[in-house]
Image (cartoon, rainbow, N blue to C red):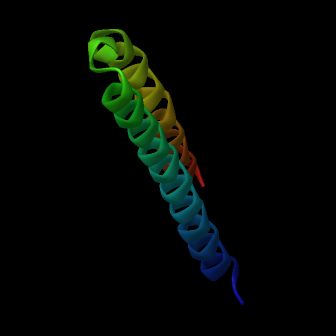
């Protein structure tokens, strides 16, 4: 294999892992937030902002993976 092919494979692996794990994390965050709001509907306002912040941090990991892919 040439270095160009290895670079393409490395980029693909980074994008795949950088997309799957943040997506799983965001899904888990949303699931737990909905469960908490379902059990206690009055807590929706208190849960919403931390939920969005957690999702933003998880999404930042995917953005870092994209940046690393462009750098390689």
Q: Residue 67: percent from the left, percent from the top?
A: 50, 43
What residue is at 49 percent from the left and 28 percent from the top? 57
For the C terminus, the quadrant is bottom right
Residue 34, image quadrant: top left
Task: Say above or below: 1 vs 46.
Answer: below
Task: Give the number of callouts.
Answer: 0
Q: Residue 54: percent from the left, percent from the top?
A: 47, 26
In the displayed orientation, state which residue is furthest to the bottom: 1
What residue is at 58 percent from the left and 60 percent from the top? 17
In this view, the residue in front, 71 or 28, is: 28
Task: Say above or below: 17 vs 44.
Answer: below
Q: Is residue 46 left or right of residue 23?
A: left
Residue 53, image quadrant: top left
What residue is at 38 percent from the left and 17 percent from the top? 47
For the N terminus, the quadrant is bottom right
Residue 10, image quadrant: bottom right
In the displayed orientation, state which residue is furthest to the front: 39
Q: Is residue 7 left or right of residue 37?
A: right
In this view, the residue in front, 28 or 61, is: 28
What residue is at 56 percent from the left and 74 percent from the top? 8
Q: Residue 26: percent from the left, percent from the top?
A: 44, 42
Task: Say above or below: 69 vs 42.
Answer: below
In this view, the residue in front, 17 or 2, is: 17
Q: Residue 22: percent from the left, percent from the top?
A: 50, 47
């Amino acid at each position: 294999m040439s270095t160009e092919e290895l670079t393409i494979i490395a980029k693909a692996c980074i994008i795949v892992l950088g997309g799957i794990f943040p997506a799983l994390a965001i899904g888990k965050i949303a699931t737990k937030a909905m469960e908490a709001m379902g059990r206690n509907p009055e807590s929706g306002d208190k849960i919403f902002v931390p939920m969005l912040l957690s999702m933003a941090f998880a999404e930042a990991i995917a953005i870092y993976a994209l940046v690393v892919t462009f750098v390689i």
